[in-house]
Image: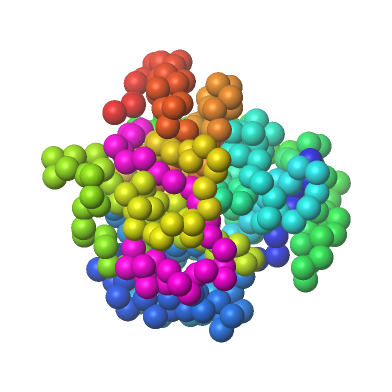
C-alpha cells in the first residue's frame, strides 16, 4: 500500500459556542463559496463543547482574530493510506481499523501523536509537521511513501533524516480513557457539490443555528442524546456526519446513501479534554476493533475523540472495549 503525504499545511482550532457568530462569515465562505478562496482543505465539526476547525493556511486567513478562537500550537500535515494507487480523496476509505496495526499502533509506540479525520471518501491521519521525519522512519518498511507536490504525486525523500537517525525507544501505552455511547444514531454521507447551493440555507441552519434545538425523536429526558455534526470540503469532495433526525430535514435524493442505508453508533472518548500531546488515544480504540474486524470512522476534535461503528456492531464494540479495559485492570465504559 501507499502512504500519501498531502501538501496541505493545516491548522487545528477550536471556536467557542458563544463566539461562533463572529466567525460565520468566514466559515460560510469556506463551506459554500470555496471558489472565492484558495482553501483546499476545510473541516468543521460541532460537538456539545465547541466547534473544531481543521483548515489549510489559506483558509485560516478567512477567520477573524478573536479571544473565542484557540489554535493548536503546531502545523499539521495530512497523511492518507491508499490501496492500489489513485486519488486519495476520491478512493473508498481504507478505514481506521484497517490501518490500526500498520499505521496507528506503530506511531503510538514511537511516541507520535495523531489527529484523525475520517470522511465519507477517505481517512486522513494528521501528524505534526515537525514529526514527519520520525513518521517516515517508522512507516517506511510497511508503505511506499509518496508526497503530493503541486498536485503531482512523487516519491517522498528522507526530509533530512540521515543515517545517524536514532530510532526512538518504544514508549508505554497511555492511560485508558473513559468511554461513553450517546443514544443518537448517525449517518455518514455526502452530496454532489453541484447540489450544494440548493441546500445551503438548510446546511447553514444545521451548522450555526440549530444547536440549541432538540431534534425530533429525542425526548427531553434523553440526556445521552448529544449534538454532533461534521462538514468537510476537501479537494472538492464533501463529507457529512449527522444524526438520523437531521438527515430527515434534507430533500429526497440529495444525500448519498449506501445500499443498506447503514446507520452508525458513536463511541465518545475522554472524560476531560484530551489535549494534543498524549499518544495512543486512537490506538486505544482502533486496535480492539481491528482485532474484532469491526469497521469504524474516527473523528478527533479539539477536546474529545469520536469513533463511529455500525449500529449492529455496537454490542460487540462494547464487549471488545470492555475486554480491553479488563486487560488493563480497569472498566471505563459508561
Residue 114: image location, x then y, percent: 56, 47
Residue 182 lies in quadrant: top left
Q: Is residue 169 above or below residue 236?
A: above
Q: Is residue 223 left or right of residue 254?
A: left
Q: Is residue 306 left or right of residue 78?
A: left
Q: Quadrant of the N terminus?
A: top right
Can residue 298 be seen in this snapshot? Answer: yes
Q: Is residue 329 above or below residue 173?
A: above
Q: Which residues are magenta?
A: 179-206
Is 196 a magenta residue?
yes
Residue 230: image location, x then y, percent: 43, 56
Q: Quadrant of the C terminus?
A: top left
Residue sitting at 36 percent across and 20 percent down?
A: 330
Residue 62: image location, x then y, percent: 48, 80
Report the colour scheme: rainbow
Q: Is residue 327 above or below residue 78?
A: above
Is 212 a magenta residue?
no
Of the pair 330 and 262, the residue shown nearer to us:
262
Count of numbered circles on the image: 0
Q: Is residue 130 above or below residue 71?
A: above
Residue sitting at 68 percent across and 55 percent down?
A: 90
Residue 180 lies in quadrant: top left
Residue sitting at 54 percent across and 28 percent down?
A: 294
**In the image, farthest residue toward the front:** 252
Can residue 117 be seen in this snapshot? Answer: no
Residue sitting at 32 percent across and 41 percent down?
A: 184
Q: Is residue 54 left or right of residue 161?
A: left
Q: Is residue 171 left or right of residue 249?
A: right
**In the image, farthest residue toward the bottom:** 36
Residue 24: image location, x then y, percent: 37, 76
Amino acid at each position: 500500500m501507499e502512504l500519501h503525504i498531502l501538501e496541505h499545511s493545516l491548522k487545528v482550532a477550536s471556536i467557542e459556542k458563544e463566539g461562533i457568530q463572529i466567525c460565520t462569515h468566514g466559515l460560510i465562505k469556506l463551506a459554500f463559496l470555496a471558489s472565492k478562496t484558495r482553501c483546499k482543505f476545510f473541516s468543521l465539526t460541532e460537538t456539545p463543547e465547541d466547534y473544531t476547525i481543521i483548515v489549510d493556511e489559506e483558509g485560516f486567513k478567512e477567520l477573524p482574530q478573536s479571544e473565542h478562537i484557540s489554535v493548536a500550537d503546531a502545523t499539521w500535515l495530512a497523511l492518507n493510506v491508499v490501496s492500489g494507487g489513485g486519488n486519495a480523496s476520491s478512493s473508498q476509505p481504507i478505514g481506521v481499523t484497517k490501518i490500526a496495526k500498520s499505521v496507528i499502533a506503530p506511531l503510538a509506540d514511537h511516541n507520535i501523536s495523531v489527529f484523525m479525520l475520517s470522511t465519507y471518501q477517505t481517512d486522513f491521519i494528521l501528524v505534526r509537521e515537525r514529526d514527519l521525519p520520525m513518521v517516515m522512519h517508522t512507516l517506511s518498511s510497511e508503505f511506499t511513501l509518496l508526497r503530493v507536490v503541486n498536485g503531482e504525486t512523487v516519491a517522498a525523500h528522507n526530509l533530512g533524516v540521515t543515517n545517524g537517525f536514532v530510532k526512538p525507544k518504544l514508549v508505554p501505552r497511555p492511560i485508558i480513557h473513559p468511554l461513553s455511547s450517546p443514544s443518537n444514531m448517525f449517518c455518514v454521507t455526502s452530496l454532489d457539490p453541484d447540489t450544494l447551493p440548493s441546500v445551503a440555507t438548510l446546511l447553514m441552519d444545521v451548522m450555526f443555528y440549530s444547536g440549541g434545538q432538540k431534534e425530533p425523536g429525542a425526548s427531553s429526558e434523553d440526556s445521552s442524546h448529544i449534538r454532533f455534526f461534521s462538514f468537510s470540503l476537501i479537494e472538492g469532495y464533501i463529507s457529512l456526519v449527522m444524526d438520523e433526525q437531521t438527515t430527515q430535514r434534507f430533500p429526497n435524493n440529495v444525500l448519498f446513501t449506501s445500499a443498506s442505508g447503514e446507520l452508525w453508533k458513536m463511541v465518545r472518548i475522554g472524560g476531560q479534554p484530551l489535549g494534543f500531546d498524549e499518544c495512543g488515544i486512537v490506538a486505544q480504540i482502533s486496535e480492539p476493533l481491528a482485532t474484532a474486524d469491526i469497521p469504524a470512522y474516527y473523528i478527533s476534535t479539539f477536546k474529545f475523540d469520536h469513533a463511529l461503528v455500525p449500529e449492529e456492531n455496537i454490542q460487540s464494540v462494547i464487549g471488545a472495549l470492555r475486554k480491553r479495559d479488563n486487560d488493563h485492570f480497569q472498566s471505563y465504559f459508561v
